[in-house]
Image (spheres, grey):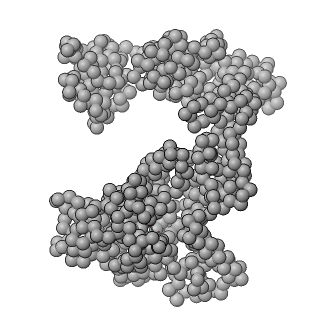
Amino acid sequence: MSNADDLTESRQQPTDEEVLRAAQLRAELHQHIYRYNVLAAPIIADAEYDALYHELRRLEEAHPELITQDSPTQRAGSDLSEDFPKVRHPAPILSLANAYSADDLREWETRNLKLLPADTTLDYTLEPKLDGLSVVLTYENGVLTQAATRGNGILGDVVTPNIRTIRTVPLRIPARPDGPPPPERLAVRGEVMFLKPDFEALNQRQKEADLPLYMNPRNTASGTLKQKDSRITASRTLTMYTYAIVEAVGIPSGITLDKQWDMLEYLRDLGFHVPPTAALYPTLDHIIQQIPAWESRRNQLDFEIDGVVIKVNDLRAADELGVSGKDPRGAIAYKFPAQEGTTKLLDIVVNVGRTGRLNPNAILEPIYIGGVTIRNATLHNFDYVHAHDIRIGDSVVIQRSGDVIPYVVGPVVAARSGDETPILPPERCPFCQTLIEHPEGVVDYYCPNRQCPERIYRSIGFFASRGAMDIEGLGGMTVKILIEQGLIKDEGDLFFLTAEQLLPLERFAEKKVENLLNAIAAAKERPLERVLTALGIDGAGSTVSAVLAREFGSMQALANASAETLDDIPQIGTVLAQGMADWFADARNRALIDKLKSAGVNMLAQERVRHGSSLEGQSFVLTGTLPTMTRDEAAELIEAHGGKIASSVSKKTNYVVVGASPGSKADKALKLGVPILGQAELLQLIESGKTSDGSRSEQ
Ligand code: IVH
């Protein structure tokens, strides 16, 4: 925010350090601007650039004498390129001042209120700050005649053919026959960008063609829009959101546009794609309250945002507030903390998971991103490392989003010195020296040795973890010690541990031993589905395990089931069915099950309570959301009354129970003439014990 025009404030002379720092920032920023715009090879993340820029801006605001003619703050960035004709925008395409805290926002409002009549109150719109590039579209008598990039804010590159390929840009307004009439001439502004799934799809295609992957959706959107051949633009799915009117000449009578909110609505009615989730709030405090929700929603949105934009709703007031530098005073961007940064990749370590999968992890020069210091980040897998050509010694871009483990996005190739070392998957397992395998068509590399100490350690850790056997006090450290001491070689050995074995160990006091042994004994009573989950069979997580426990009733019955029998269960696919059958066919796994059984670990599903037989012999398919119960609850209820649940509708289905937003199963039921029930009718059916409707003759 610019205070530079507030001359009443008394100012201090800048200190020597401040003079020096400003010069340093100018030099650094010039470097980055050149690298970004001329070389198209930036070496820092956008958020880091912003931070440097903002620091200089603050220094200059506090001490305007520090402003030099060549300061990067004295010009708006330019995206002009020599490849396109230029056009003058109907009005300057302004930028936005940034706020980083609620206090910044309150100061902004206070400053604004001072510039407006004494009793003014302001309401505000809250919009996502879309992380794309600004574009101006011009419509004459409802027809899209020109599209230009922001350029330097005064002149833009004409990219009309490219913009015409974007399906969310109406070529004619109103887009709907019943839409409102458009002004004779209308210039609108919006943001062109990739939706996350479209960007991922683009990278998927790159990958399949063995081409380098794109790192950053915004830069890729910019590159896509600046293609000389619009067929290339058309082949990638860009999206545009429109959020402002730059110029309107000949506004039809009856249309008033003196509020930002009305303007968004008018744009929407004309057929523009306006930012979803924009909202109007009566006070700034309401807005401030909403910000944390926006921040946590950030990663669920289909598009990248780097903050929110708050706009004075009253456009006349906004107009009166005018412009400070290149920022309108009537709007401000609240920027979220950076989630990206660049740092040096010092080394990699390879972990081996319980399935033998190798997980490469980056050791980083510590970097502070969005409130946390990051020292490690995942490199996903070796195919990812290879596709991105990530090397040790590289400057790498790190992304952190929400609670997800930070990951390496890719290297900054332009910052290479030539001393970087390529990363190759190890030939042998770092823990047991067995030759590594890379199965055909799979991105991962595996240690195939089931006796690998690291795999055993991970398996037992998983077995004891919450959600599995939930053995309190059996954390990673303890498991490691027990393995090292030769006391356990597999999950089954846990149940044969004795106090005599544990007490002599260092840091195993009497109380601790007692608690641990009690926790292990208690775990023997876990329900069958937990025992199954704990075995860590590929694909058998808690949901599938629950289905298997319910279907088979015992470990024995499941172990004896053939792949074909397993495949008949709706929730189990062919691959999983074969994997399960193979797992149980393996002698070592059978031995483990026997060991667990002999230790007294529960191997039976709980008896299902039978409430009646009113639905005996009837098959049901469930679809949609029921009013007061989940589909699982409904399934349980049906089964408790003797009915059976099937996953797909056929002529043999007796009833389809349909809730809100049903899937295609409801259509199929109609087509096949299968009776359709609501929740209430299902309950009635159970209640009345009436089955005659359901016993349909086979057709
Ligand atoms: S309003 C005078 N609204 O953010 C109007 N800008 O950092 C100024 N941006 O240059 C723009 N989402 O490219 C506005 N909902 C939104 C926006 C938005 C993204 C971009 C725009 C602007 C930049 C400023």
Q: Quadrant of the C terminus?
A: top left
Residue 594 in which image quadrant: top right
Residue 623 point in image, percent of width and height? 31, 30
Residue 265 position in % (x across, y down):
27, 63
Ligand 1 located in image quadrant? bottom left
Whole-percent x, y for residue 654 in the image: 25, 18
User: Which residue is drawn at the image coordinates 32% and 57% (left, top)?
Assistant: 168
Give the vertical position of 252 relative to 10 (above or below): above
Is residue 150 visible to us here? no
Residue 45, by quadrant, is bottom right
Counting from the top left corner in percent of width and height, residue 258 is at 27, 74
Above or below, 686 against 454 in this view is above
x 73%, y 28%: residue: 434
**Front one among 690 and 1:** 1
Q: Is residue 99 shown above or below 603?
A: below
For the question of whether residue 440 can be seen, the reply is yes
Residue drawn at (62%, 26%), measured in percent from left and top? Answer: 463
Would you identify the image quadrant in which residue 519 lies?
A: top right
Image position of 581 (left or right of 226) = right
Horizontal side of 199 relative to 433 (left or right) equals left
At a point 59% along the width and 72% down the height, the residue shown is 34
Q: Identify whether 430 is placed above or below 522.
A: below
Give the number of callouts: 0
